[in-house]
Amino acid sequence: MAHTTETAPATRTTDPLLTTVRVLAVLTVVNLLWQYVTAGQLFPRGGPEELHSTGAIVLHVLSGLTAIAALAYWRLRGAPVWPGVLAAVVFVLSFVQAWYGGRSTLYIHVPGAMILTIGAVWVAAWSFSRAAAVTTRR
């Protein structure tokens, strides 16, 4: 007796736009970790300041792309707007942070790094939450 088994076609369990938000948000946090490591090496030995500066440029790019992706996820999928707004704030603050990146303004630069990190981690954590996967439009 012949027996056939039909299988259902594979279905996507994760929205590609949400995956994009997740990847960019995690890369932003990893880049901030890089910034902490290279900043720590700036003192007392003088360290790789060029690596820290390059990391700042990468942070601008990654945080900007995270903001765009999170805002697109809000606009196209009906996700909450606040993660996109927070990601945009992180993006803008990364430029303020770079402006105050000199050794004479570390009293602004170091707390600014903490604020950037909190915002970036918050967006990344949200992107992996159950609430991020629930959208009203597809």
Image (spheres, rainbow, N blue to C red):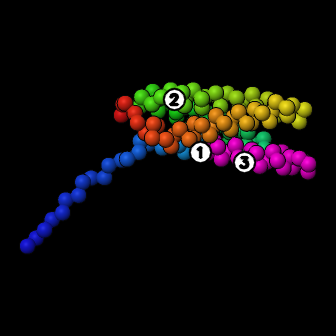
Amino acid type for the residue under numbered disc 3:
Trp
Outermost residue to the front: 130
Q: Quadrant of the C terminus?
A: top left
Visible residue check, residue 74: yes
Residue 71's disc number: 2
Residue range of the region highlighted in magenta in the rendering: 26-49
Q: Quadrant of residue 104?
A: top right
Query: Which residue sits at x=73%, y=36%?
Result: 114
Badge 2 or badge 3: first in the primary sequence: 3
Q: How far is disc 1 from disc 3 in space, using C-alphas?
A: 12 Å
Q: Position of residue 53 (x, y in %)?
A: 78, 41
Residue 26's disc number: 1
- Say if 98 sits above or below 9 in the image: above
In what element is the residue under mark 1? helix
Image marks 2 and 3: residues in contact by CB distance under 8 Å: no
Image marks 1 and 3: residues in contact by CB distance under 8 Å: no
Query: Which residue sits at x=48%, y=44%?
Result: 19
Q: Position of residue 124 (x, y in %)?
A: 57, 40
Amino acid type for the residue under numbered disc 2:
Leu
Query: Which residue sits at x=61%, y=45%?
Result: 27
Badge 1 or badge 3: first in the primary sequence: 1
Q: How far is disc 1 from disc 2 in space, using C-alphas?
A: 16 Å
Residue at label 3?
Answer: 34
Q: Position of residue 41 (x, y in %)?
A: 84, 50
Question: Position of 79 compared to 47: left or right?
Answer: left
Task: Decide: few, some or many residues near mark 1? Use Cα within 10 Å; few <14, some 14-19, many ≥20.
Answer: many
Q: Quadrant of residue 113?
A: top right
